[in-house]
């Protein structure tokens, strides 16, 4: 297997490497027309990459998005001793083969863990494979409290000794993990994934109740099943895992990103035009599908994807609550709000998953949006058009929302905080430019 130099395939693309001081300049007013390839889902590929830690055999992932989070996790895995081999072809996009024939649990890089929430998944996987894991509390977007108490309680139920001192998590299971019944207080995506990863190597049966049902979890279950794991209840809120079997290698294609699909569809509704969203799947949208349709986003099933355009009635206000899947995805809340900022009529957008996920509101207001926040609800009164301003992204989805706002606004919007966009999306600006958007990177 090749080692560190392999990541250079990702690093070769200027689009994912945000140098500090680089901004995006988005000229509003161009209609979007053309084909936009939807990439593999960010929130699917990260747990899939971690799953390779569970076996000494090769795991190959196709349709890997070239995002900064993928690059950071690649580095983390390499330092743990995992061999990575990148390749690229037109049909399956980027492919990554991982070989965890050896794993060195003491080599978890603390700085890198601090950069990404998904690194908490190393806890379950490294603990299950090596009998010990030690990592700092994970970083990630500042969108709420984001505790890890469900992860820790589940691992303790499986026999792990877990101690958190000075912001560092020390977990041990010297005699191995054992299957357990775990009921999650909330259907946490990360806790479900962490416990799944641990349970496939634990001895005996683990049952996870109130499990999250996001499509990215089903994708992980499918990959683990291809590796030989026995898991029942895929797509339901009870997952039953018969653990303890040695896993083999597997080849898996990452499912398409439903958040990128919803975001770009909203962008087309704002700018007008018609875009073929290649590989997009409307069935992954859950409640966001009908909500987008009610707001005036038309998504037509066509061969190879979805055709997105604005309905002839234009964009109209809607009320929505974010909920665990199949409810309306919290990750679509900010981009949809950016679209609703210029809808006919008013909208009430209620965020129920994260405590601080309205940080894009102040930035949209700088662009002339009429939004007021009362508790967990943002009241959006549609204005005719937004006006360009200098704005800053504070998280991945806020970054996408501000790109969308800039595409519809009058004038040149300057977007700072680009690393957030590049963390979560595979060359989004590049792909929008190919559909007629006028976007440049500026280091001024
Ligand atoms: N929670 C706890 N304790 C826990 C775990 C979760 O209190 O031990 C709380 C959280 O604070 C939050 C709620 O439960 O209020 C739901 O959190 P969840 O664990 O489901 O979220 P996550 O695993 O941290 C993933 C995605 C998020 C996405 C959420 C919800 C990844 C890497 N992250 O986060 O994605 O918003 O599920 O769907 O998969 C993003 O992509 O921009 C993003 C933030």
Image: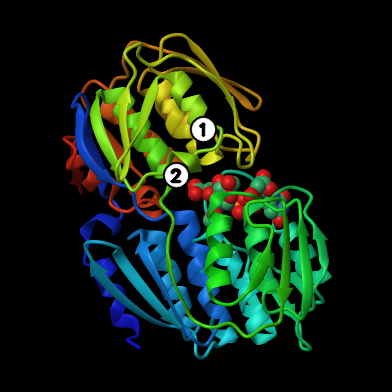
Q: How far across and how far down the image is residue 201, in percent?
A: 68, 79
Mark 2 Cβ and ligand 1 under 8 Å apart? no
Q: In the figure, residue 435 lies in which quadrant?
A: top left
Residue pictured at 64% horizontal, 28% vertical: 376
Kindly identify the residue that appears in the image at 60 percent across and 67 percent down.
Answer: 121
| Residue 101 visible in the current orientation | yes
The residue positioned 63% from the left and 49% from the top of the image is 213
Residue in view at x 29 percent, y 57 percent: 16
Which quadrant is the C terminus positioned in?
Answer: top left
Q: Is residue 384 left or right of residue 105?
A: left
Quarter of the figure that contains the N terminus: bottom left
Return the mark for residue 327.
none
Residue 288 is labelled as 1
- Residue 111 visible from this viewpoint: no
Give the camera-side residue of 339 and 56. Answer: 56
Mark 2 surroundings: few (<14), some (14-19) or many (≥20) residues within 10 A: many
Question: Among all residues in the image, which is located at the extreme front?
Answer: 303
On screen, residue 363 above or below 422:
above
Q: Nearer the viewer, residue 6 or 310?
A: 310
Q: Position of residue 5 (x, y in %)?
A: 28, 81
Does label 2 or label 1 sit earlier along the sequence?
2
Residue 424 vertical placement versus 410 (above, below): below
Residue 375 pos. (x, y %): 66, 25
Q: Decide: marks 2, 1 in contact (CB < 8 A)? A: yes
Mark 1 beta carbon near ligand 1 (under 8 Å) = no
Q: Secondary structure at mark 2?
A: helix
Q: Is residue 200 left or right of residue 53?
A: right
Residue at numbered disc 2: 258
Judge by depth and name the residue closer to the eye, 79 or 247.
247
Residue 305: percent from the left, percent from the top? 33, 43
């Amino acid at each position: 297997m090749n080692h560190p130099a392999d990541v250079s395939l990702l690093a070769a693309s200027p689009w994912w490497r945000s140098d500090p001081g680089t901004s995006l300049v988005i000229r509003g007013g161009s209609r979007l027309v053309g084909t936009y390839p939807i990439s593999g889902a960010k929130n699917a590929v990260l747990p899939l990459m971690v799953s390779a830690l569970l076996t000494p055999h090769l795991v190959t992932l196709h349709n890997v998005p070239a995002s900064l989070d993928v690059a950071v996790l690649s580095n983390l895995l390499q330092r743990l001793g995992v061999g990575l081999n990148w390749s690229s072809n037109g049909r399956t996009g980027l492919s990554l083969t991982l070989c965890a024939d050896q794993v060195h649990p003491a080599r978890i890089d603390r700085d890198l863990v601090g950069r990404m929430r998904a690194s908490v998944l190393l806890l379950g996987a490294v603990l299950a494979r090596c009998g010990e894991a030690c990592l700092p509390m994970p970083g990630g977007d500042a969108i709420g409290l984001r505790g890890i108490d469900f992860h820790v309680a589940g691992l303790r139920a499986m026999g792990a000794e877990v101690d958190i001192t000075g912001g560092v998590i020390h977990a041990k299971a010297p005699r191995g993990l054992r299957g357990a019944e775990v009921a999650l207080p909330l259907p946490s995506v990360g806790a479900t994934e962490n416990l799944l990863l641990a349970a496939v190597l634990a001895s005996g049966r683990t049952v996870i109740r109130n499990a999250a049902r996001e499509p990215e979890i089903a994708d992980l279950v499918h990959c683990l099943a291809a590796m030989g794991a026995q898991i029942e209840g895929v797509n339901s809120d009870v997952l039953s895992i018969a653990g303890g079997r040695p896993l083999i290698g597997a080849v898996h294609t990452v499912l398409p990103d439903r958040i990128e699909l919803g975001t770009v569809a909203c962008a087309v509704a704002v700018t007008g035009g018609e875009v073929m969203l290649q590989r997009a799947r409307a069935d992954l949208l859950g409640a966001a599908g009908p909500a987008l349709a009610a707001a005036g986003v038309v998504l037509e099933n066509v061969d190879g994807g979805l055709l997105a355009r604005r309905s002839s009635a234009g964009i109209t206000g809607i009320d929505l609550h974010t909920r665990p899947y199949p409810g309306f995805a919290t990750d679509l809340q900010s981009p949809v709000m950016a679209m609703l900022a210029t809808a006919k009529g008013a909208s009430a957008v209620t965020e129920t998953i994260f405590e601080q996920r309205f940080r894009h509101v102040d930035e949209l207001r700088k662009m002339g949006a009429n939004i007021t926040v009362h508790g967990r609800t943002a009241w959006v009164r549609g204005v005719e058009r937004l006006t360009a301003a200098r704005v800053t992204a504070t998280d991945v989805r806020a970054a996408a929302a501000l790109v969308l706002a800039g595409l519809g606004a009058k004038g040149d919007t300057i977007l700072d905080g680009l690393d957030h966009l590049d963390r979560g999306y595979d060359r989004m600006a590049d792909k929008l430019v190919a559909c007629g958007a006028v976007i440049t990177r500026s280091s001024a």
